[in-house]
Image (tube, rainbow, N blue to C red):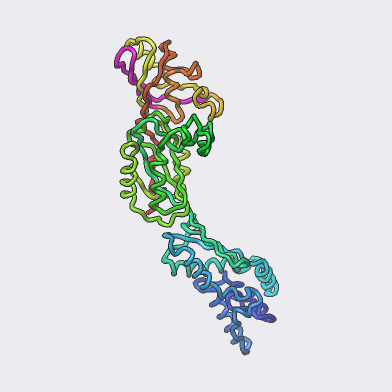
C-alpha cells in the first residue's frame, strides 16, 4: 500500500500526532525520527490533496495520549536516578499502558496495515528516551548486560534503575593453614552462636568454625572500594582448610552488587587487600571482569599439582616406596566418596587420573609426595586409602597406614587454553 494512502487513512478521523503517524511506516526509511516521518507524510499529503494538514499537538493524539511528548521528561528522571552512580553502559525498557497498545492496533487496522507493521510504541519510547539518557549521562547504550537497566512503567508513573553487579577477577594464594575459602558457619548452632544466650560450645559463641577466611580478607574490601551493597566470593574449586594454596594461586571472582563505583584502580585494590591480609592471604592479577567470568571460574575443571608431607605407621625403604609410587604414577583411581566429606557430597564412585606421582623419603617413616592429578582427585585419600574407599592408594600398595600431615596445592591449571582470556575482562 502507498505510504500516502496509509497516512490518509490514519488521519481521516481522529487526530494522530506526527510520531504515531510516522511509526506506521518506520520500516520505509532510515535516519529519521518517527516524528520527522510523520511530519513529512503530513506535508506530502497536504500537497497531494491541496488542503491544509495542520500538525497535531501530541497531547491531542488519541493513540499515545501525549506520551510521545514525554521523552525528555523520562530521560531526565532516569539520569537523576543514577546521578551518584558510576556507569558506562545502560539500556531502557518500557511497559506501556494496555490502552496505548490497543490504540496502536486500532490505528494499524484503520490504516489497512498488518498488526506487526511499522514500529511498536514501546520500541520508539525505549529508543528516544535512551538516546536522551546517553546524552545526559555521557554513556553508551548496550543490549548485552548493561551496567544500568532502566525500566519505565508508564501506567504507574514509575521508573526503576537496576544497577547490575560488577566483577573483579584475580588469583589468591593462601599462605597459612586453617583458613577456609569462604565463611564457615557452625553446624551445631547453624551460625547463630545462639545469639549470646547459652553460647554454642562448638564454636565458642561466634557462629563460625574459623575466625578468618579468604572471602573475609578480600570481598569486604572490594565491596567498600566499589561502594556496593553486598559482595559474593566465587572460587574455582577450593582446597582443604588445612592446606595452603601456593604457586600462582587459585582463580576467583568477587561479585559486587549495586556498585556506585566501577572504574577502580585494581593495582591499588590489590595492595589494599594484601596489606589487610597481612601475609595470611595474597591476591595477584586483579582485573575488572565480565559476568561470564563467574561461570568460567565455577565450572573450571582444573588439573592440580600437590605436595604432601606423609607419615607412615612403620619404617619404609626407598625401593619399596619407589615401587608403590610407580603404581600410582599414571594410574586411573577409583574413589568412593571419602568419609570426611560424605555429609556434603553424593555417595558414588568417581574415577580420576593421576598424571604424575613422585615420592622421596626424608627418613624411614616420613616422605614428601608430589602429585599432578585431574580435577576432583582426593589426594589425602590417594595416600591413605580411606579404609579401602580409594583404589589404588599409596598406603594400600605399601600395606601400611599412611597419613597426610601437611598438604600444599602448588598449581591450579586450566585444561586446554589459557584461562585468563581477554574476552572475559573489561577495560
Instruction: Answer with the quarter of the image where residue 303 lies.
Output: top left
Q: Could you say where residue 86 lies in the image, as x and y percent from the top left?
A: 41, 60
Instruction: Answer with the quarter of the image where residue 277 lies.
Output: top left
Instruction: Answer with the quarter of the image where residue 98 lies.
Output: bottom right
Look at the magenta stretch and give its main secondary structure: strand
Residue closest to the far front: 197
Q: Could you say where residue 305 lies in the image, as x and y percent from the top left?
A: 37, 29
Q: Could you say where residue 424 lies in the image, as x and y percent from the top left?
A: 42, 48
> Taking 192 as reference, is 84 left or right?
left
Q: Could you say where residue 278 lies in the image, as x and y percent from the top left?
A: 31, 39
Residue 410, above or below 226: above
> Taking 368 as reference, is 63 left or right?
right
> Taking 195 as reference, is 426 left or right?
left
Q: Quadrant of the C terminus?
A: bottom left
Asked if residue 368 lies in the magenta stretch, the reply is: yes
The residue nearer to you, when weighing 262 against 110, is 262
Q: Is residue 420 visible?
A: no
Magenta segment range? 350-372
Residue plotted at (42% across, 44% down): 253
Residue 218, above or below 5: above
> Taking 282 as reference, is 39 left or right?
right
Q: Is residue 216 visible?
A: yes
Q: Quadrant of the N terminus?
A: bottom right
The residue nearer to you, when weighing 281 against 76, is 281
Marker count (numbered): 0
Residue plotted at (61% across, 74% down): 20
Amino acid at each position: 500500500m502507498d505510504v500516502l494512502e496509509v497516512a490518509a487513512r490514519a488521519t481521516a478521523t481522529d487526530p494522530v500526532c506526527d510520531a504515531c503517524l510516522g511509526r506506521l511506516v518506520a520500516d520505509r526509511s532510515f535516519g529519521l525520527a518517527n516524528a520527522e516521518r510523520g511530519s513529512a507524510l503530513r506535508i506530502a499529503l497536504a500537497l497531494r490533496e491541496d488542503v491544509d494538514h495542520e500538525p497535531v499537538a501530541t497531547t491531542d493524539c488519541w493513540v499515545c495520549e501525549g506520551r510521545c511528548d514525554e521523552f525528555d521528561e523520562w530521560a531526565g528522571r532516569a539520569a537523576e536516578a543514577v546521578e551518584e552512580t558510576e556507569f558506562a553502559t545502560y539500556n531502557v525498557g518500557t511497559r506501556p499502558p494496555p490502552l496505548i497498545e490497543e490504540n496502536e492496533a486500532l490505528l494499524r487496522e484503520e490504516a489497512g496495515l498488518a498488526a506487526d507493521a511499522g514500529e511498536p510504541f514501546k520500541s520508539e519510547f525505549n529508543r528516544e528516551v535512551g538516546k536522551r539518557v546517553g546524552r545526559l549521562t555521557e554513556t553508551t547504550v548496550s543490549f548485552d548486560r548493561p551496567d544500568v537497566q532502566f525500566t519505565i512503567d508508564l501506567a504507574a508513573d514509575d521508573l526503576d534503575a537496576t544497577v547490575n553487579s560488577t566483577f573483579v577477577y584475580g588469583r589468591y594464594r593462601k599462605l597459612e593453614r586453617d583458613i577456609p575459602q569462604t565463611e564457615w558457619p557452625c553446624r551445631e548452632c547453624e551460625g547463630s552462636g545462639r545469639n549470646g544466650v547459652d553460647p554454642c560450645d562448638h564454636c565458642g559463641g561466634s557462629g563460625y568454625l574459623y575466625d578468618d577466611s579468604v572471602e573475609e580478607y578480600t570481598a569486604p574490601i572490594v565491596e567498600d572500594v566499589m561502594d556496593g551493597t553486598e559482595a559474593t566470593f566465587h572460587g574455582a574449586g577450593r582446597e582443604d582448610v588445612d592446606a595452603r594454596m601456593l604457586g600462582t594461586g587459585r582463580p576467583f571472582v568477587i561479585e559486587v552488587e549495586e556498585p556506585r563505583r566501577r572504574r577502580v584502580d585494581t593495582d591499588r585494590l590489590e595492595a589494599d587487600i594484601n596489606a589487610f591480609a597481612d601475609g595470611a592471604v595474597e591476591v595477584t592479577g586483579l582485573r575488572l571482569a565480565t559476568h561470564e567470568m563467574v561461570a568460567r571460574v565455577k565450572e573450571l575443571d582444573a588439573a592440580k599439582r600437590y605436595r604432601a608431607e606423609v607419615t607412615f605407621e612403620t619404617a619404609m625403604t626407598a625401593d619399596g616406596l619407589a615401587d608403590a609410587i610407580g603404581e600410582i604414577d599414571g594410574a586411573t583411581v577409583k574413589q568412593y566418596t571419602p568419609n570426611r566429606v560424605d555429609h556434603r557430597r553424593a555417595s558414588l564412585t568417581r574415577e580420576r587420573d593421576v598424571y604424575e606421582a613422585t615420592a622421596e623419603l626424608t627418613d624411614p617413616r616420613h616422605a614428601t609426595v608430589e602429585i599432578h592429578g585431574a580435577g576432583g582427585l582426593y589426594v589425602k585419600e590417594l595416600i591413605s586409602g580411606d579404609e579401602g574407599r580409594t583404589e589404588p592408594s599409596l598406603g594400600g600398595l605399601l600395606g601400611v597406614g599412611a597419613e597426610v600431615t601437611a598438604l600444599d596445592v602448588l598449581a591450579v591449571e586450566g585444561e586446554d587454553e589459557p584461562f585468563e582470556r581477554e574476552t572475559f575482562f573489561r577495560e
